[in-house]
Image (cartoon, helix red, strand yellow):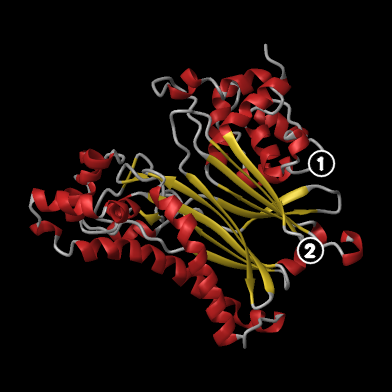
Amino acid sequence: MPSFEELRRKLAHFYSARTVDTGLGAEIHTVTFQPLRKRANQDRLVMHQLNIHGQEWLLLAVCDGHGGATTAKYTASHLPSRILSALQHITDTHMEGRPDRESVLEKFDFISSELARCIKDFDRELGYVVQTVCPAPSQLSAKQARRIVWEYPDALQRAYAGTTLAAAVVNLHHRFMWTMNVGDSTLALSTVDENGKRSAHELCVRHSPERDDTLKVHAGEAIIQHGRVLGSLAVTRAIGDFAFKLPVDYSYRLFRLLSAEFGTQTLRDSVLERIRSPPYITADPFVQFIDLEAFWEQQPVLMIFTDGVDKLLNRSRYYFNAWSKPRDIIEPARAVAVLLQDDVDKSVEELLGFSVDPRWSGDLHNRALDVLGNLVGGTDTRILQMVMDQDLLADRTAYPSLHIDDTSIVICSFADPPSPSQTS
Protein backbone atom coordinates (compact mmCIF):
# COMPACT_ATOMS: atom_id res chain seq x y z
CA MET A 1 0.00 0.00 0.00
CA PRO A 2 1.50 3.40 -0.99
CA SER A 3 2.03 5.85 1.83
CA PHE A 4 -0.03 9.02 2.32
CA GLU A 5 2.91 11.13 1.14
CA GLU A 6 3.27 9.09 -2.05
CA LEU A 7 -0.45 9.36 -2.83
CA ARG A 8 -0.47 13.09 -2.12
CA ARG A 9 2.35 13.57 -4.63
CA LYS A 10 0.54 11.41 -7.18
CA LEU A 11 -2.68 13.39 -6.77
CA ALA A 12 -0.78 16.53 -7.82
CA HIS A 13 -0.95 15.27 -11.43
CA PHE A 14 -4.72 15.86 -11.41
CA TYR A 15 -5.06 19.35 -9.95
CA SER A 16 -3.75 22.85 -10.54
CA ALA A 17 -3.27 25.05 -7.47
CA ARG A 18 -2.18 28.64 -7.03
CA THR A 19 -1.59 31.05 -4.14
CA VAL A 20 -1.44 34.85 -4.44
CA ASP A 21 -0.77 37.33 -1.64
CA THR A 22 -2.04 40.68 -2.92
CA GLY A 23 -0.17 42.60 -0.24
CA LEU A 24 -3.35 44.66 0.14
CA GLY A 25 -5.13 42.75 2.88
CA ALA A 26 -6.21 39.73 0.85
CA GLU A 27 -4.62 36.32 0.22
CA ILE A 28 -6.09 34.11 -2.50
CA HIS A 29 -5.81 30.34 -2.79
CA THR A 30 -7.25 28.38 -5.72
CA VAL A 31 -7.43 24.81 -6.94
CA THR A 32 -9.18 23.04 -9.83
CA PHE A 33 -9.37 19.25 -10.07
CA GLN A 34 -10.42 16.45 -12.41
CA PRO A 35 -8.95 12.98 -11.74
CA LEU A 36 -10.09 11.20 -14.93
CA ARG A 37 -7.28 11.69 -17.44
CA LYS A 38 -9.44 11.29 -20.55
CA ARG A 39 -11.90 13.94 -19.38
CA ALA A 40 -10.86 17.56 -19.90
CA ASN A 41 -11.62 19.87 -17.01
CA GLN A 42 -14.35 22.29 -18.15
CA ASP A 43 -14.06 24.65 -15.14
CA ARG A 44 -12.29 27.97 -15.44
CA LEU A 45 -11.07 30.27 -12.64
CA VAL A 46 -10.87 34.06 -12.58
CA MET A 47 -8.49 35.96 -10.32
CA HIS A 48 -7.83 39.62 -11.17
CA GLN A 49 -6.56 42.63 -9.25
CA LEU A 50 -8.12 45.82 -10.56
CA ASN A 51 -7.14 49.43 -10.02
CA ILE A 52 -10.02 51.84 -10.47
CA HIS A 53 -9.04 55.47 -9.97
CA GLY A 54 -6.39 54.56 -7.43
CA GLN A 55 -8.50 52.12 -5.42
CA GLU A 56 -7.68 48.42 -5.37
CA TRP A 57 -10.36 45.87 -6.26
CA LEU A 58 -10.43 42.10 -6.62
CA LEU A 59 -12.48 40.10 -9.10
CA LEU A 60 -12.74 36.41 -8.24
CA ALA A 61 -14.92 33.84 -9.98
CA VAL A 62 -15.44 30.22 -10.92
CA CYS A 63 -17.07 29.25 -14.22
CA ASP A 64 -18.43 25.68 -14.27
CA GLY A 65 -18.68 24.74 -17.94
CA HIS A 66 -20.95 22.07 -19.41
CA GLY A 67 -21.38 20.81 -22.95
CA GLY A 68 -17.70 21.66 -23.43
CA ALA A 69 -15.41 24.30 -21.96
CA THR A 70 -15.98 26.88 -24.73
CA THR A 71 -18.46 29.14 -22.92
CA ALA A 72 -16.70 28.88 -19.56
CA LYS A 73 -13.38 29.79 -21.17
CA TYR A 74 -14.89 32.71 -23.09
CA THR A 75 -16.70 34.00 -20.01
CA ALA A 76 -13.59 33.79 -17.84
CA SER A 77 -11.60 35.64 -20.52
CA HIS A 78 -14.07 38.36 -21.52
CA LEU A 79 -16.56 39.03 -18.72
CA PRO A 80 -13.95 40.54 -16.32
CA SER A 81 -13.26 43.44 -18.71
CA ARG A 82 -17.01 44.09 -18.96
CA ILE A 83 -17.31 44.21 -15.18
CA LEU A 84 -14.28 46.50 -14.93
CA SER A 85 -15.80 48.86 -17.51
CA ALA A 86 -19.11 48.86 -15.64
CA LEU A 87 -17.41 49.74 -12.35
CA GLN A 88 -15.34 52.47 -13.98
CA HIS A 89 -18.45 53.94 -15.61
CA ILE A 90 -20.37 53.93 -12.31
CA THR A 91 -17.43 55.56 -10.53
CA ASP A 92 -17.02 58.23 -13.21
CA THR A 93 -20.67 59.13 -13.67
CA HIS A 94 -22.15 58.62 -10.21
CA MET A 95 -19.30 59.04 -7.71
CA GLU A 96 -17.18 61.85 -9.14
CA GLY A 97 -14.36 59.49 -10.03
CA ARG A 98 -13.59 58.12 -6.57
CA PRO A 99 -16.14 56.20 -4.46
CA ASP A 100 -16.25 56.79 -0.72
CA ARG A 101 -18.13 54.74 1.87
CA GLU A 102 -21.05 57.13 2.06
CA SER A 103 -21.66 57.23 -1.68
CA VAL A 104 -21.39 53.45 -2.02
CA LEU A 105 -23.83 52.86 0.83
CA GLU A 106 -26.25 55.26 -0.86
CA LYS A 107 -25.96 53.58 -4.25
CA PHE A 108 -25.24 49.90 -3.54
CA ASP A 109 -28.63 48.85 -4.95
CA PHE A 110 -27.96 50.75 -8.17
CA ILE A 111 -24.49 49.21 -8.45
CA SER A 112 -26.00 45.76 -7.88
CA SER A 113 -28.49 46.30 -10.70
CA GLU A 114 -25.74 47.52 -13.04
CA LEU A 115 -23.62 44.44 -12.33
CA ALA A 116 -26.65 42.23 -12.99
CA ARG A 117 -27.29 44.05 -16.25
CA CYS A 118 -23.65 43.56 -17.26
CA ILE A 119 -23.99 39.78 -16.92
CA LYS A 120 -27.35 39.63 -18.70
CA ASP A 121 -26.04 41.76 -21.57
CA PHE A 122 -22.96 39.57 -21.88
CA ASP A 123 -25.14 36.48 -22.21
CA ARG A 124 -27.62 38.17 -24.55
CA GLU A 125 -24.81 39.04 -26.95
CA LEU A 126 -23.83 35.38 -27.27
CA GLY A 127 -27.28 34.64 -28.68
CA TYR A 128 -27.48 37.87 -30.65
CA VAL A 129 -24.40 36.91 -32.68
CA VAL A 130 -26.07 33.64 -33.71
CA GLN A 131 -29.24 35.48 -34.72
CA THR A 132 -27.18 37.99 -36.69
CA VAL A 133 -25.31 35.40 -38.78
CA CYS A 134 -28.52 33.41 -39.23
CA PRO A 135 -31.70 35.52 -38.93
CA ALA A 136 -33.97 32.90 -40.54
CA PRO A 137 -32.85 29.36 -39.62
CA SER A 138 -36.06 27.71 -40.88
CA GLN A 139 -35.19 28.80 -44.43
CA LEU A 140 -31.72 27.27 -44.48
CA SER A 141 -30.83 24.46 -46.81
CA ALA A 142 -28.51 21.75 -45.49
CA LYS A 143 -25.65 23.21 -47.53
CA GLN A 144 -26.25 26.75 -46.20
CA ALA A 145 -26.40 25.47 -42.62
CA ARG A 146 -23.08 23.65 -42.95
CA ARG A 147 -21.47 26.76 -44.44
CA ILE A 148 -22.59 28.89 -41.48
CA VAL A 149 -21.29 26.27 -39.04
CA TRP A 150 -17.92 26.25 -40.76
CA GLU A 151 -17.73 30.05 -41.02
CA TYR A 152 -18.76 30.79 -37.41
CA PRO A 153 -17.84 27.74 -35.32
CA ASP A 154 -16.57 29.70 -32.32
CA ALA A 155 -19.66 31.91 -32.04
CA LEU A 156 -21.99 28.93 -32.38
CA GLN A 157 -20.13 26.82 -29.85
CA ARG A 158 -20.04 29.69 -27.33
CA ALA A 159 -23.81 30.00 -27.62
CA TYR A 160 -24.47 26.25 -27.60
CA ALA A 161 -22.30 25.24 -24.62
CA GLY A 162 -22.97 26.76 -21.21
CA THR A 163 -21.46 27.77 -17.92
CA THR A 164 -22.54 28.72 -14.45
CA LEU A 165 -20.95 31.73 -12.79
CA ALA A 166 -20.12 32.49 -9.17
CA ALA A 167 -18.23 35.77 -8.84
CA ALA A 168 -17.29 38.45 -6.33
CA VAL A 169 -15.95 41.97 -6.77
CA VAL A 170 -14.27 43.39 -3.68
CA ASN A 171 -13.18 46.93 -2.93
CA LEU A 172 -10.23 46.39 -0.61
CA HIS A 173 -9.89 50.09 0.18
CA HIS A 174 -13.39 50.50 1.65
CA ARG A 175 -14.07 46.79 2.36
CA PHE A 176 -17.17 46.42 0.21
CA MET A 177 -18.13 43.35 -1.80
CA TRP A 178 -20.74 42.33 -4.36
CA THR A 179 -21.38 38.66 -5.06
CA MET A 180 -23.07 37.42 -8.25
CA ASN A 181 -24.18 33.95 -9.24
CA VAL A 182 -25.92 32.23 -12.11
CA GLY A 183 -26.45 28.49 -11.69
CA ASP A 184 -25.58 26.12 -8.87
CA SER A 185 -22.09 27.08 -7.72
CA THR A 186 -21.67 28.52 -4.22
CA LEU A 187 -20.46 31.78 -2.70
CA ALA A 188 -20.25 32.03 1.08
CA LEU A 189 -18.55 34.08 3.76
CA SER A 190 -16.95 32.26 6.68
CA THR A 191 -16.33 34.00 10.00
CA VAL A 192 -14.95 32.95 13.38
CA ASP A 193 -17.04 33.09 16.56
CA GLU A 194 -15.86 33.79 20.10
CA ASN A 195 -14.95 30.10 20.52
CA GLY A 196 -12.71 30.08 17.45
CA LYS A 197 -15.19 28.01 15.41
CA ARG A 198 -15.95 28.85 11.81
CA SER A 199 -19.47 29.22 10.45
CA ALA A 200 -20.67 29.94 6.93
CA HIS A 201 -23.14 32.48 5.56
CA GLU A 202 -24.26 31.74 2.01
CA LEU A 203 -24.25 34.69 -0.40
CA CYS A 204 -25.98 33.04 -3.34
CA VAL A 205 -29.18 31.44 -4.59
CA ARG A 206 -28.73 28.10 -6.34
CA HIS A 207 -30.64 28.03 -9.61
CA SER A 208 -31.46 24.33 -9.79
CA PRO A 209 -34.77 22.83 -11.00
CA GLU A 210 -35.87 21.92 -7.49
CA ARG A 211 -35.14 25.41 -6.10
CA ASP A 212 -35.93 27.88 -8.90
CA ASP A 213 -39.56 28.68 -9.70
CA THR A 214 -38.92 30.57 -12.96
CA LEU A 215 -40.31 27.69 -15.05
CA LYS A 216 -43.87 28.25 -13.88
CA VAL A 217 -44.52 30.16 -17.12
CA HIS A 218 -44.32 26.79 -18.88
CA ALA A 219 -46.93 25.17 -16.68
CA GLY A 220 -48.50 23.44 -19.68
CA GLU A 221 -45.32 21.54 -20.49
CA ALA A 222 -43.44 18.81 -18.62
CA ILE A 223 -40.31 20.94 -18.28
CA ILE A 224 -38.62 19.19 -15.36
CA GLN A 225 -37.87 15.54 -16.07
CA HIS A 226 -35.59 13.41 -13.90
CA GLY A 227 -34.66 16.54 -11.96
CA ARG A 228 -33.38 18.37 -15.05
CA VAL A 229 -34.68 20.94 -17.52
CA LEU A 230 -36.12 18.87 -20.40
CA GLY A 231 -34.32 15.92 -18.86
CA SER A 232 -30.97 17.41 -19.84
CA LEU A 233 -29.85 20.58 -18.05
CA ALA A 234 -29.16 20.57 -14.31
CA VAL A 235 -29.61 24.34 -13.85
CA THR A 236 -32.36 26.81 -14.67
CA ARG A 237 -30.03 29.75 -15.16
CA ALA A 238 -26.77 29.75 -17.09
CA ILE A 239 -24.66 31.77 -19.48
CA GLY A 240 -24.95 30.26 -22.96
CA ASP A 241 -27.10 27.15 -23.45
CA PHE A 242 -29.00 28.85 -26.27
CA ALA A 243 -30.57 25.59 -27.37
CA PHE A 244 -32.83 26.26 -24.37
CA LYS A 245 -33.27 29.99 -25.17
CA LEU A 246 -33.56 30.46 -28.94
CA PRO A 247 -36.35 29.12 -31.19
CA VAL A 248 -35.98 25.40 -31.81
CA ASP A 249 -35.04 25.87 -35.50
CA TYR A 250 -31.60 27.04 -34.36
CA SER A 251 -31.10 23.70 -32.64
CA TYR A 252 -32.39 21.61 -35.54
CA ARG A 253 -30.60 23.55 -38.27
CA LEU A 254 -27.35 24.67 -36.62
CA PHE A 255 -26.53 23.46 -33.11
CA ARG A 256 -26.99 19.78 -33.88
CA LEU A 257 -24.45 20.09 -36.73
CA LEU A 258 -21.71 21.07 -34.26
CA SER A 259 -21.44 17.47 -33.09
CA ALA A 260 -20.87 16.05 -36.58
CA GLU A 261 -18.55 18.83 -37.71
CA PHE A 262 -16.53 19.60 -34.57
CA GLY A 263 -17.19 16.81 -32.07
CA THR A 264 -19.25 19.01 -29.75
CA GLN A 265 -21.43 17.16 -27.25
CA THR A 266 -24.49 15.85 -29.05
CA LEU A 267 -27.86 17.56 -28.70
CA ARG A 268 -29.99 14.45 -28.22
CA ASP A 269 -33.16 13.90 -30.23
CA SER A 270 -35.01 13.19 -26.99
CA VAL A 271 -34.22 16.78 -25.88
CA LEU A 272 -35.01 18.33 -29.25
CA GLU A 273 -38.43 16.72 -29.23
CA ARG A 274 -39.27 18.50 -25.94
CA ILE A 275 -38.25 21.99 -27.05
CA ARG A 276 -41.52 23.75 -27.86
CA SER A 277 -41.67 27.24 -26.39
CA PRO A 278 -38.23 28.51 -25.34
CA PRO A 279 -36.75 30.26 -23.52
CA TYR A 280 -36.73 27.74 -20.67
CA ILE A 281 -33.76 29.25 -18.83
CA THR A 282 -32.25 32.69 -18.33
CA ALA A 283 -28.95 34.24 -17.27
CA ASP A 284 -30.53 36.53 -14.66
CA PRO A 285 -28.02 36.61 -11.78
CA PHE A 286 -28.57 36.84 -8.06
CA VAL A 287 -26.53 39.82 -6.82
CA GLN A 288 -25.88 40.69 -3.18
CA PHE A 289 -24.00 43.54 -1.50
CA ILE A 290 -21.93 42.88 1.64
CA ASP A 291 -20.22 45.45 3.84
CA LEU A 292 -17.10 43.51 4.87
CA GLU A 293 -16.25 46.14 7.46
CA ALA A 294 -18.92 44.62 9.70
CA PHE A 295 -17.11 41.25 9.65
CA TRP A 296 -13.48 42.41 9.60
CA GLU A 297 -12.71 41.48 13.21
CA GLN A 298 -14.13 37.97 12.66
CA GLN A 299 -11.37 36.83 10.27
CA PRO A 300 -13.61 36.77 7.18
CA VAL A 301 -12.90 34.27 4.43
CA LEU A 302 -14.67 34.32 1.07
CA MET A 303 -15.37 30.83 -0.30
CA ILE A 304 -16.33 30.23 -3.94
CA PHE A 305 -16.70 26.71 -5.33
CA THR A 306 -18.43 24.71 -8.02
CA ASP A 307 -21.02 22.01 -7.39
CA GLY A 308 -18.23 19.45 -7.66
CA VAL A 309 -17.77 20.12 -3.94
CA ASP A 310 -21.45 19.36 -3.29
CA LYS A 311 -21.15 16.06 -5.16
CA LEU A 312 -18.00 14.99 -3.33
CA LEU A 313 -19.75 15.60 -0.03
CA ASN A 314 -23.14 14.12 -0.78
CA ARG A 315 -22.64 11.63 -3.59
CA SER A 316 -19.10 10.26 -3.82
CA ARG A 317 -18.87 9.56 -0.09
CA TYR A 318 -21.60 6.91 -0.47
CA TYR A 319 -19.19 5.13 -2.81
CA PHE A 320 -16.27 5.56 -0.41
CA ASN A 321 -18.25 4.54 2.66
CA ALA A 322 -21.08 2.05 2.24
CA TRP A 323 -22.34 2.80 5.76
CA SER A 324 -23.11 6.45 4.95
CA LYS A 325 -26.82 7.22 5.25
CA PRO A 326 -28.62 9.30 2.59
CA ARG A 327 -30.25 11.38 5.31
CA ASP A 328 -26.83 12.56 6.50
CA ILE A 329 -26.73 15.49 4.10
CA ILE A 330 -23.70 17.72 4.57
CA GLU A 331 -24.18 21.44 3.91
CA PRO A 332 -21.27 22.25 1.53
CA ALA A 333 -20.59 25.81 2.71
CA ARG A 334 -20.50 24.74 6.36
CA ALA A 335 -18.23 21.78 5.55
CA VAL A 336 -15.75 23.96 3.65
CA ALA A 337 -15.74 26.51 6.48
CA VAL A 338 -15.08 23.81 9.07
CA LEU A 339 -12.27 22.34 6.96
CA LEU A 340 -10.59 25.76 7.05
CA GLN A 341 -10.26 25.60 10.84
CA ASP A 342 -6.87 24.96 12.37
CA ASP A 343 -8.33 22.18 14.51
CA VAL A 344 -10.07 19.03 13.26
CA ASP A 345 -13.83 18.95 13.75
CA LYS A 346 -14.73 15.40 14.73
CA SER A 347 -18.35 15.79 13.59
CA VAL A 348 -17.23 16.41 10.00
CA GLU A 349 -14.85 13.45 10.16
CA GLU A 350 -17.74 11.28 11.30
CA LEU A 351 -19.93 12.42 8.41
CA LEU A 352 -17.14 12.02 5.85
CA GLY A 353 -16.14 8.65 7.23
CA PHE A 354 -12.39 9.30 7.26
CA SER A 355 -9.75 11.38 9.05
CA VAL A 356 -8.78 14.82 7.78
CA ASP A 357 -5.69 17.00 8.07
CA PRO A 358 -6.26 20.80 8.30
CA ARG A 359 -2.91 21.29 6.55
CA TRP A 360 -3.37 18.60 3.92
CA SER A 361 -1.41 20.58 1.30
CA GLY A 362 1.80 20.39 3.34
CA ASP A 363 4.56 22.71 2.21
CA LEU A 364 2.32 24.30 -0.45
CA HIS A 365 0.28 26.02 2.27
CA ASN A 366 -2.71 26.30 -0.04
CA ARG A 367 -6.02 26.47 1.83
CA ALA A 368 -8.12 25.61 -1.24
CA LEU A 369 -6.00 22.50 -1.73
CA ASP A 370 -6.35 21.69 1.98
CA VAL A 371 -10.14 21.61 1.48
CA LEU A 372 -9.97 19.58 -1.73
CA GLY A 373 -7.56 17.02 -0.29
CA ASN A 374 -9.82 16.45 2.69
CA LEU A 375 -12.90 16.15 0.47
CA VAL A 376 -11.36 13.45 -1.72
CA GLY A 377 -10.07 11.23 1.06
CA GLY A 378 -8.23 13.17 3.75
CA THR A 379 -5.52 10.88 5.13
CA ASP A 380 -7.29 7.63 4.15
CA THR A 381 -4.89 5.96 1.71
CA ARG A 382 -7.52 3.49 0.50
CA ILE A 383 -9.84 6.26 -0.65
CA LEU A 384 -7.03 8.38 -2.10
CA GLN A 385 -6.10 5.42 -4.28
CA MET A 386 -9.70 4.98 -5.38
CA VAL A 387 -10.11 8.58 -6.55
CA MET A 388 -7.17 8.11 -8.93
CA ASP A 389 -8.18 4.65 -10.24
CA GLN A 390 -8.87 5.31 -13.92
CA ASP A 391 -10.97 2.17 -14.41
CA LEU A 392 -13.23 2.98 -11.46
CA LEU A 393 -13.61 6.60 -12.54
CA ALA A 394 -14.49 5.67 -16.13
CA ASP A 395 -17.03 2.96 -15.27
CA ARG A 396 -20.45 4.61 -15.54
CA THR A 397 -22.30 1.25 -15.51
CA ALA A 398 -21.58 0.55 -11.84
CA TYR A 399 -24.09 1.60 -9.18
CA PRO A 400 -23.13 3.65 -7.40
CA SER A 401 -20.50 4.87 -9.84
CA LEU A 402 -17.36 6.74 -8.85
CA HIS A 403 -17.98 9.72 -11.10
CA ILE A 404 -16.10 12.78 -9.85
CA ASP A 405 -17.17 16.07 -11.37
CA ASP A 406 -14.79 18.92 -12.17
CA THR A 407 -14.17 20.61 -8.82
CA SER A 408 -12.86 24.15 -8.37
CA ILE A 409 -12.38 26.13 -5.17
CA VAL A 410 -11.36 29.74 -4.48
CA ILE A 411 -10.52 30.76 -0.91
CA CYS A 412 -9.83 34.44 -0.18
CA SER A 413 -8.91 35.52 3.36
CA PHE A 414 -9.05 39.17 4.42
CA ALA A 415 -6.95 40.99 6.97
CA ASP A 416 -5.31 44.37 7.47
CA PRO A 417 -2.40 44.81 5.04
CA PRO A 418 1.07 44.96 6.62
CA SER A 419 2.37 48.41 7.52
CA PRO A 420 5.40 49.80 5.65
CA SER A 421 7.64 49.06 8.67
CA GLN A 422 6.58 45.40 8.53
CA THR A 423 7.44 45.05 4.85
CA SER A 424 10.78 46.90 4.98
Where is residue 304 shown, x and y percent of the image?
Answer: 60, 51
User: Please, what is the three-letter code of the amino acid marked with disc 1?
Assistant: Asp
> Residue at (23%, 66%) from the top-left corner?
132
Where is residue 423 shown, x and y percent of the image?
Answer: 87, 60
Q: Is residue 165 above or below residue 83?
A: above
Q: Residues within 10 Å of mark 2 (few under 14, many from 20)?
A: some
Q: Residue furthest front?
A: 424
> Residue at (30%, 41%) from the top-left corner?
264
Q: Is residue 98 visible in the rendered structure shown here?
A: yes
Q: Is residue 353 visible in the rendered structure shown here?
A: no
Identify which residue, 59 or 189, lies in the foreground. 59
Q: State the residue position of label 2.
A: 296
Identify which residue, 53 or 108, lies in the foreground. 53
> Residue at (21%, 62%) from the top-left corner?
133
> Which quadrant is home to the N terminus?
top right
Q: State the residue position of label 1.
A: 342
Q: Secondary structure at mark 2?
A: helix
> Residue at (14%, 62%) from the top-left corner?
136
Q: Is residue 75 above or below residue 343?
A: below
Labels 2 and 1 touching (C-beta < 8 A): no
Task: Classify residue 130 by image quadrant.
Answer: bottom left
Q: Secondary structure at mark 1?
A: loop
